[in-house]
Image (cartoon, rainbow, N blue to C red):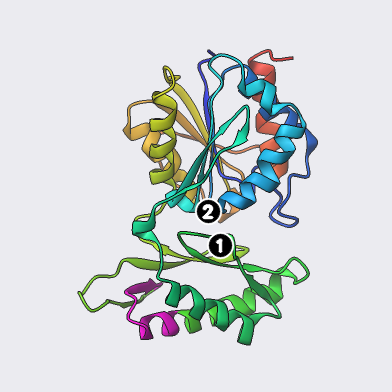
């Protein structure tokens, strides 16, 4: 086993935030080679299990992931919806998705936001029907970034009013409305291409913990880890690893949003960002580990 483990956000370092697919072929082949060499790899994402199955695991399987994961010591895991769902990824492909129902919304709340998008915001965004623990609304791929950026806060404000009107305890920026018990168990969390409405218990550190538990049950853990992401919340993957006593560095593939001050190293990939930076990071480690 190589002394390296990897925790990846998906949108940004692996999948293009523009096309939402893996566009750089070397990302696929390098991930397969590293999995075959025994590097434990986890995808820790706000995306749904269906998205990861179709847009990440399927291309990896086409490149030989099944055979790679049959090798002794090979481990891969997926954590979706920021820890609200998860699944093993093995030589047989991605397994059944488990959902943490304790952090999920009621069907009434889901239906209300779906109707809001359909009736008022369908020209710029769509309701993500694949999410099972959180509510997500995403920028349409035929809508430019500036148009979406103008519509996004209007949607978020309308969704906040709608859900709090249904009795949901919700936080959105400086606005916070408790539920009948006085609790605020949910939050509105914007990204550059979507808005997630989610339990406050969900985040990338929770996802990292679940991945570590899965890997540890199947063999010794490497002492050296790298987490890779494009948002400030992705640093929480490395926060968890550092707090657990392992050596870690975080690779920020969108540092223009601001590099956070952390007690571990933060790495940037020159002037490369998003999946170009992710591809260069993987190529570096494939060379470093001397993998064919």
Please report whichever mark, 2 or 1, sits nearer to the chain's N-terminal start: 2
Q: Position of residue 10 (x, y in %)?
A: 61, 46
231 to 4, vertically: above or below? below
**SS assignment at label 1:** loop
Q: Position of residue 134 (x, y in %)?
A: 47, 62
Question: Which labelled disc corresponds to residue 46?
Answer: 2
Question: Which labelled disc corresponds to residue 289?
Answer: none
In this view, the residue in front, 54 or 20, is 54
Query: At 42% across and 20% down in the image, what residue appears?
Result: 221
The boundaries of the magenta stretch are 160-173
Q: Quadrant of residue 248?
A: top left
Left or right: residue 224 versus residue 242 is right
Q: Quadrant of the C terminus?
A: top right
Residue count near mark 2 (Cα–Cα under 10 Å), binned few <14, some 14–19, many ≥20: many
Query: At 33% across and 31% down in the image, what residue appears?
Result: 244
Kindly identify which residue carries mark 1.
191
Q: Would you say residue 46 is visible in this rendering? A: yes
236 to 280, vertically: above or below? below
């Amino acid at each position: 086993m190589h002394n390296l483990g990897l925790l990846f956000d998906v949108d940004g370092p692996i999948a293009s935030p523009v096309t939402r697919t893996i566009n750089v072929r070397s990302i696929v082949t390098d991930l397969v080679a590293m999995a075959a060499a025994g590097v434990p790899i986890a995808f820790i994402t706000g995306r749904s299990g269906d998205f990861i199955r179709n847009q990440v695991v399927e291309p990896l399987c086409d490149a030989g992931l099944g055979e790679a994961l049959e090798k002794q010591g090979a481990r891969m895991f997926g954590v979706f919806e920021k820890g609200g769902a998860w699944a093993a990824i093995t030589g047989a492909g991605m397994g059944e998705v488990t959902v943490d129902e304790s952090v999920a919304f009621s069907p009434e709340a889901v239906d209300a936001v779906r109707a809001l998008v359909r009736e008022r915001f369908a020209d710029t965004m769509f309701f993500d029907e694949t999410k099972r623990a959180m509510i997500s609304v995403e920028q349409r791929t035929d809508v430019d970034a500036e148009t979406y950026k103008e519509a996004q806060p209007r949607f978020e404000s309308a969704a906040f009013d709608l859900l709090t009107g249904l009795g949901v305890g919700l936080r959105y920026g400086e606005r916070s409305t408790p539920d009948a018990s006085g609790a605020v168990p949910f939050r509105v969390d914007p990204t550059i291409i979507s808005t997630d409405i989610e339990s406050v218990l969900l985040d990338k550190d929770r996802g990292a913990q679940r991945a570590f538990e899965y890997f540890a049950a199947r063999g010794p853990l490497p002492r050296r880890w790298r987490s890779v992401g494009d948002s400030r919340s992705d640093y929480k993957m490395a926060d968890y690893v550092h707090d657990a006593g392992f050596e870690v560095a975080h690779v920020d593939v969108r540092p223009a949003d601001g590099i956070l001050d952390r007690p571990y190293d933060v790495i940037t990939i020159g002037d490369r960002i998003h999946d170009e930076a992710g591809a260069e990071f993987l190529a570096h480690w494939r060379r470093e580990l001397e993998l064919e």
